[in-house]
Image: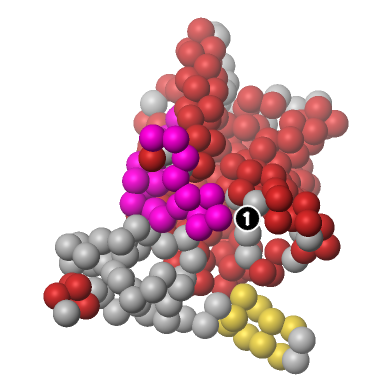
Amino acid sequence: MRVMVLAVPYPVIDPVLVEIGPFAVRWYALAYIAGLTLGWGLVRALARASQPSVLSDAQVDDLLVWATLGTILGGRLGYVIFYNPLYFLANPLEIPMMWHGGMSFHGGLLGVCLAVIAFCRLRGLSLLRVGDRVAVAAPIGLFFGRLANFINGELFGRVAPDVPWAMVFPRGGDVPRHPSQLYEAGLEGVVLFVLLLGVWRFTALKNRAGALVGLFLIGYGMARTTAELFREPDAHIGFLSMGVTMGQVLSLPMIVIGLVFLVRALRRPALDA
């Protein structure tokens, strides 16, 4: 009985915002749209602030399309490969059924990276300078994505009977759990965004091409590794060796690669942003 007293009521929200016949608008889709649209506006503003401009408005518009495809395809394939390869190997027709859930941030990141690399090479643009601006905007999408996870009642946290803000999630049994989706929204979204935007506005690191890419990778890797301490591992994977989770394993290379980007950026001569 004491467990239930400490649990905060979970605000059950229908994952489907509007449904007309076979057509349904889901909060998850709106989260992607909001993140990409707001990120697009910020990248535009950051590109315009550069002299000469790193990207024209038309190029930012085109980049949005590339980034959207990279996010969706990479996120889905990442989930298939990293989190449930045997299931999808046996059920390949379900791979494109993204409305059933199953997206990987790390896969989405790889997809966006490949999309940005291809876009910059085809357009003859500076990959690192474009990447820095995309990195500053990326936490916006992370924030909305984690809120959508919370609305869907998925990716919930570990059992937390003594935490006063713990919640009983519909898919998590009758025990109170950490609302880890909100922790991730705060760390990966709000904190990381404030950090990167602050570095852009108030420091000279924005003049070091690749520095913000490095800071994003380090910041996300650390935020995700921390949040994983409270998040329930995927049921079909569970904990790996020594209690480590798959999310932590995938985040470690990000931190290392981010450090490489940052060190190299600091060794380069400063440029006008």
**Residue positioned 65% across, 51% down in the render:** 84
Q: Is residue 234 magenta?
A: yes
**Residue positioned 14% across, 75% down in the render:** 2
Residue 250 visible to the viewer: yes
Q: Is residue 218 magenta?
A: yes
Vertical position of residue 256 compared to residue 14: above or below: above
Q: Of 50 and 172, which appears nearest the observer?
A: 172
Residue type beneath disc 1: Met
Residue extending furthest left?
2
Q: Of 138 and 184, which appears nearest the observer?
A: 184
Task: State left or right for residue 226 relative to residue 216.
Answer: left
Q: What colouring style does the render use?
A: secondary structure
Local SS, label 1: loop
Vertical position of residue 120 compared to residue 186: above or below: above
- The range drawn in magenta is 214-242
Instruction: Give the percent coordinates (x, y) of residue 255.
Output: 47, 27
Pointer 1: what residue?
A: 103
Instruction: Give the percent coordinates (x, y) of residue 207.
Output: 51, 21
